[in-house]
Amino acid sequence: MIRLFLLAWLAGQSPSSEAMQHIQAGLEARKQHQVETEIVEFRKATELDPTLADAFVNLGAAYMEKGDYGVAITPLKRALEISSDLVVAHQFLGYALLEQGYAAEAIPHLQRVGALDALGVAQIETGQLNEAVASFSAAFSNRPNDPDLQYYLGHASGLLSKKSIDTLLATHPDSARAHQALAENYFVLRQMPQAEKEYLEALRLRPDLPSLHLELGQVYANSAQWPKAETEFRAEAKLRPGSAEAAYRLGAALLQQGKSRDALVELKRANELKPEMPETLYSLGKAAALAGDNATAEQSWLKVVELEKDTSIAAQSHFGLAGLYRKQGKTAQAQHEMQEFQKLQSTIGPPRSE
Amino acid sequence: MVRRFTRRSLLSLAGMAAAAPIFEVKPLRGIDFILQNSPTAKKFLIETMPGGVALFDYNNDGLLDIFLVNGGRITEALHVPENFDRANPRYWNRLYRQNRDGSFRDVTQAAGLANVGNGNYGMGVAVGDYDNDGYPDLFVTSYGKNVLYHNNGDGTFTDVTAKAGVAGGGWSVSAGFFDYNNDGLLDLFVTRYMEWDADHNKICGGDWHTYCPPSVFPATTCLLYRNRGDGTFEDVSERAGFTAKKGRALGVAFADYDGDGFTDIFVSNDGMQQYLFHNNGDGTFNECALESGAALTSDGKGLSGMGTAFQDYDNDGRPDVIVTVLPRELYGLYHNDGAGAFTYQSLETGLGALTSGSSGWGVGLEDFDNDGWKDLFVAQSHVLDNVQQIDASLRYKELPLLALNHSGHFERANSGATTPIAARGAAFGDINNDGFMDVVLTTLGGPPMLLLNRGSGGHWLSIMLRGSRSNRDGYGARVSVNGQIRFATSAGSYVSANDKRLHFGLRTAEKATVEILWPSGTKQSLNGVRADQFLEIREPEHP
């Protein structure tokens, strides 16, 4: 990458001295992958003409090719002293400094050339997490399929999140948000009694805080305490009547308790608030089937298999449809759906128990 | 404001008014048995799976006796061929004879049941009079070889395994006698769990060191033995279609679910789909759980099937299926819709809400409060002894589940047990002949637990069948009492055998109409039968 970039850049230069001949020799050596010769030739060029910025840039690049980032820094800096507008020198110097751990010093050079991914890394290392997330986000919009970028964006966001929470816990340890943050941490660690305790404390402090009831409900749902989960999800749904998730989770909790008609109402509401969500549609189908509303069940599950193809929820919907058709005496359709279910089972594996 | 009471709220109020527990935990006087499962740090999978209990009247004195299956000695150095030290009395299976005063006497040695063989780690027990001599025989399953004990009728048993040809091999778990070909002779079905031995044991759970899930080991097949009637059995597993269906079978229960006159088999498999073997009536079976709707949950997911019961919970005349499983699943209830179809109804029946955090093993559908509806009792405990360290919301030891049946809806009731236990086997029967069904549980590393029914009221009828053209135990008969149905069997639950007498709660009825469809095809009706009695009904010699 460095080589291609340099060749392109040097193509625009015009050799006019003995120094330039060494540069040409260095470039020839580069083509032959003779990095030691490159270094010798570029160094001679810098000795013959200490004002030739091109020679210093090439020398620095050769050291970088060799992996001697620390040695590369001096000629690259010299090149910028000679010509501060040399973009390629800024870029190489930024990378070299970053590689050597001088992240703060690298940042202005990387900013200058818009090397967003390397800039983001330097910003992480200097604790500029907001800026790092912004850099990675900007880079990500151009290269959304780059796995390195995906990693770094997630990494930076996680660090930023942790920093914010640490600050919250340090500055407002008795706040509802601090208890919520602790509860979320316990939840991730599957320490449900501690999570429950923290959520309850957060709710005591701020009973109207959005998402607290939802999250506490999930703690109860996780330990199969469905009546308690229902209570919390209902409270969330009351606080936020426009929340599709609250309606969905309330419906699911009702369904788990066999309250199919009540579940149907909530799941229909969730589907209206946020249509075409496969999980909602699947549960809606299930609640409808239990409540005897076969038309809604069929419609919901058919929608799922339209939206989802090779997924577990698609397999489950085929299975649900097979049962529905079997009960209706639609043998051929039941068999077809069962075949689709089995086909998916053989490709994606059987649906797993919770 | 007028408050409207729903049926459910009234039931709830009634429940509060009648908060007294159904059972009382009573000491089993004279029983000093400890189930030696011998847990080790090596987490040999067999350690967490025993052991069975049978309630049967081996000496025909009218009192239920208790047979308990022991595990065996396991050390961390266990290797093939395994030696479980079963000659050591500490590891014997035990037979306890009930005395008139309700106490028990250990008659193991006198009965000839002491040493089951050092290579056999005990699992379960089945009871049936396979030679129709009027005395119930015992079949004991093991990891290793199974043993058939013939009841000699004089208080002793004889190991007839070699002659009978039913030793099997591998890891057998639950078993049951039934007459699959209606020839009047009890045949034998044996579930086998997986291909496992001590040299191929694995430890799972990373740093937690847990027993491995079943999927880690290869599946295996169940066994069907046809009773030739001369004291020998023929292994017909292949011919009948069982070798074609590998599974991880733990429980088995029998009933004629489609009313074609032939007894079918439900097998609970661990960590996969369940099996329903339809009896084709020609000596073969067809596994049809998936197309019948009894294989998976309503989400198309497999179950960690352990124990099972195959009786009619909603009094519609058709046997339904219950399967006990691990937490995060729901105990499976498959309602028999008729025409060979089942619907998963764990949620509608309230069972889901009661069981999603529990692990179930032995299970029975019996009318404990004599109200005319079969209630549910489950022996509970997680399979992993360190589960609480892994998931704080789960418990290794649990209270048993008693769920009373209110017109087809199950509601939790106070079982009377107050100490969580690691329960496995469960057998159901009327231990003290008072007209109320009792329960005996086995517990890993502990003594059996008797839950004696306090008897809260309601009339009842207990029927003991005596077949003539059919098998003498009458297994496979469909018995209707005032419209309630029971399918005669001592099998079901997990690794256990129940009192073969058929118990019916009659609520306020003082008379009963009894109708029996015998396996021979003979129909028999009795009208105006007095309630509150133990009634032996003999099959007519001629239809």
Image (spheres, rainbow, N blue to C red):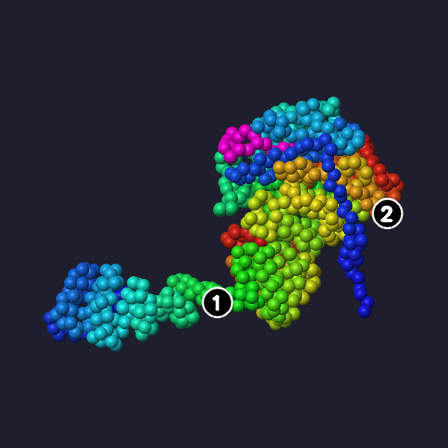
Is there any visible trace of residue B526 in the rendered image? yes
The disc numbered 2 marks a residue on which chain? B
**Position of residue B140 in the picture relative to residue A168 (left or right):** right
Amino acid at dot 2: Thr
Query: At 77% across and 45% down in the image, what residue appears?
Result: B22
* Secondary structure beneath label 2: loop
Task: Report whether B417 appears left or right of B507.
Answer: left
Assign a secondary structure to mark 1: helix
Location of mark 2 (residue): B508
The answer to whether residue A16 is above or below residue B509 is below
Q: Is residue A200 above or below residue A50?
A: above
* Range of residues picked out in magenta: B69-84
Q: Which residue is mark 1?
A: A167
How many marks overall? 2
User: Residue B472, how many percent across, how many down?
Assistant: 75, 31
**Residue located 65% across and 54% down the image:** A326
Magenta: predominant secondary structure element? loop
Circle 1 residues within 10 Å: few <14, some 14–19, many ≥20: few
**In magenta segment, residue B202:** no
Q: At 24% across and 76% down in the image, what residue appears? A: A84
